[in-house]
Amino acid sequence: MRRIILKNGRIFDGSGSASFTGSVLIEGDRIAQVGRGNEGLIGAGDAEIVDCAGATVMPGMIEAHGHLTWPSSTERFEPRFMLPPEEMMLAAARNGRILLDHGFTSVFSAGALGERIEVVLRDEFARGALPGPRLLASTIERSPEGAEGIETGKKLSIGEGPEAMRAFVTRCHELGIDTVKLVLSGEDQLLPGSSQHILYHEDEVTAACETAHKLGMRVAAHTQAAEAVKIALRSGVDILYHCTHADAEALDMLAAHKDRIFMAPAVGVLVGTMEATPPPHIDMSSMKAFAAPAIEMSQALVPELKRRGVRVLPGGDYGFPFNPNGANARDLQHFVDLYGYTPAEALSAATMLGGQIMGMGGELGLVRPGYIADLLIVDGDPTANVAILQDKANLRGIMQAGSFYKTPAPVASCFGVA
Ligand SMILES: [Zn+2]
């Protein structure tokens, strides 16, 4: 079994507690030991040593609202949203590699633009055939047939009502999908005023959640209107995105479900919208007009949810030309700048809580013995300045399940450990 010691690094373990200088022993795909200071790691005599002086060893980041099929990335501007299937497949594979290059070792998908595309990619990434993150594969973002608003490509034609929803989720399970994405409310950014439109009946959402949970799947929902948040919570939805218009009752309900649910405001896309300088033939004035108050509302909501113990995660709808895949670490800085998080709190949300949203909280997202060795070796100290994670040049090493995807130089074999 391959054994690697990451030595002399500043260890940020993901829990949010203070970093310390120490060593991490990795055996196979797992973290075996974590030692403080110069204390020896027992039985580590024949391990390869990686000197991490000047660097921080931390868990790989986890994107809580990923869209690998959304085509634009830091490497490739793509003015179209829906690509033909061949281009889409390649763009999604490329985006997986780009997220990994930028330190995201896991992605919880918030929706795909094709039925099986993420299932195929997940399996290719998992067996190392293509470089990419650990991925939970989603469905096409599903709004009811005939609903206006979000154009998400061809969807499974299933009709309406609870039975249809059960059939839909069952079909998704047969396709190998991990998580169902329902568009419970419209979206002002795409159709002005539609954030207040409720697109599903509550019994439909309940049927989808019951079936998904029975089959070991989870349900994520696009929820903007307060009523959409409430329907989601009453129905058993596991992951709520946006929640921009949550009122006091919705907030209380979110807090009451805090041990079961996850929330991600997806603020990155809003900041990207405000910063965008589109060419003259693209009119983003309406999007900007809705984004500004949405950011303000989230600034009231997120700190209160955090205060009340709700698990709020970074992850911000990356994949648009003005908010490209690969820029995902910007969300951590947004949590600091907009929501008053300390860098360590933002990092903990992107790692420890990330492991939990992946459904692997007992083995992913922390630098702890027994955990999967998905690790970053970062030049500098992201707990002092979380923005350094936005530059992939600062990622000295990227490890997936105990193997280096990006190898820090030099890796030397030696005997004896200080
Ligand atoms: Zn999204």
Image (cartoon, rainbow, N blue to C red):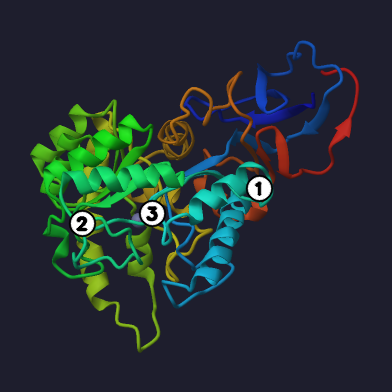
Say if 230 sits above or below 13 in the image: below
Q: Quadrant of the N terminus?
A: top right
Nearer the camera: disc 1 or disc 3: 3
- The residue carrying mark 1 is 395
Q: Is mark 1 within 8 Å of ligand 1?
A: no
Nearer the camera: disc 3 or disc 2: 2
Nearer the camera: disc 2 or disc 1: 2
Residue found farthest to the bottom: 281
**Nearest to N terminus: mark 3 or mark 2:** 3
Dot 1 amino acid type: Leu
Q: CA distance from mark 3 to mark 2?
A: 20 Å
Residue at 25% from the left image edge and 77% from the top image edge: 285
Q: Secondary structure at mark 2?
A: loop
Dot 3 amino acid type: Gly
- The residue carrying mark 3 is 111
Residue at 47% from the left image edge and 73% from the top image edge: 83
Q: Do residues under tags 3 and 2 come within 8 Å of each other at their CB atoms?
A: no
Q: Position of residue 175 (x, y in %)?
A: 44, 47
Q: Is mark 3 within 8 Å of ligand 1?
A: yes
Q: Nearer the viewer, residue 292 or 314?
A: 314
Say if 135 sits above or below 267 in the image: above
User: Would you say 36 lies left or right of 151 here?
Assistant: right
**Quadrant of residue 189 in the image?**
bottom left
- The residue carrying mark 2 is 159
Q: Nearer the viewer, residue 403 or 307?
A: 403
Q: CA distance from mark 1 to mark 3?
A: 28 Å
Mark 3 crowdedness (10 Å alpha carbons): few <14, some 14-19, many ≥20? many
Q: Position of residue 147 (x, y in %)?
A: 18, 64
Residue at 61% from the left image edge and 42% from the top image edge: 126
